């Protein structure tokens, strides 16, 4: 459960900005850190909007068991409204119903997949 977020961050954009008249400041926000079990400040940033797009900022939404972050996004400048869809129904997935076929398998909801050397990215 995520606690109520602190008040919005009153962040001042830095003097340095991209060399583009279209650059806009996207304010920072409070993000939830599961390891700390607390909020952390996420710094704002200058961005150059995609052509004919505008920014819809993210926000914290009060839900039954706490708070949920709704991510910001880009939308067409001509859009007059935004339709937010209801949450999907709860997953019917309950995990694997049988043990792994072998040590080289991992579970992806709905199926066991074999781990092969080709599927493991190498670190260089």
Image (cartoon, grey):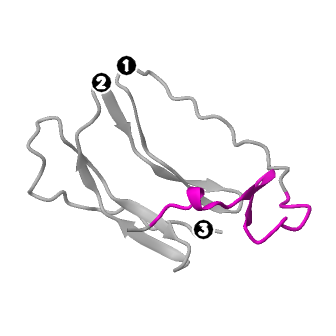
How far across and down, in percent of the image, does residue 92 sit? 85, 50
- Chief secondary structure of the magenta portion: loop
Image-quadrant location for residue 45: bottom left
Residue position marked by numbered label 3 in the rendering:
2
Asked which secondary structure carries label 3, the reply is loop
Q: Is the C-beta separation of discs 1 and 2 under 8 Å? A: yes
Magenta-tinted stretch: 94-122
Q: Nearer the viewer, residue 32 or 10?
A: 32
In the drawing, what numbered circle is on residue 78? 1
- Say if 124 sits above or below 90 in the image: below
Can you say which quadrant of the picture contains the N terminus? bottom right
| Residue under the image location 42 percent in, 72 percent down | 40
Residue position marked by numbered label 2 in the rendering:
52
Label 1 and label 2: CA atoms lie apart by 8 Å
| Residue under the image location 42 percent in, 40 percent down | 73
Answer few, some or many: residues within 10 Å of disc 3's Cα (few below 14, many 20 plus, some between 14 and 19). Answer: some
Extreme front residue here?
117
Q: Nearer the viewer, residue 96 or 25?
A: 96
């Amino acid at each position: 459960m995520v606690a109520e977020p602190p008040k919005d961050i009153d962040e001042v954009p830095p003097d340095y900005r991209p060399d583009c008249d279209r650059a806009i400041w996207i304010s920072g926000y409070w993000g939830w850190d599961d390891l700390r079990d607390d909020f952390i400040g996420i710094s704002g940033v200058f961005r150059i909007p995609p052509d004919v797009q505008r920014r819809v900022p993210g926000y914290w939404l009060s839900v039954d068991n706490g708070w949920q972050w709704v991510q910001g996004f880009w939308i067409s400048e001509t859009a007059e409204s935004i339709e937010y869809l209801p949450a999907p129904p709860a997953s019917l997935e309950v995990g694997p119903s049988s043990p792994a076929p072998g040590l080289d398998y991992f579970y992806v909801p709905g199926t066991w997949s074999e781990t092969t050397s080709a599927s493991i990215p190498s670190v260089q």
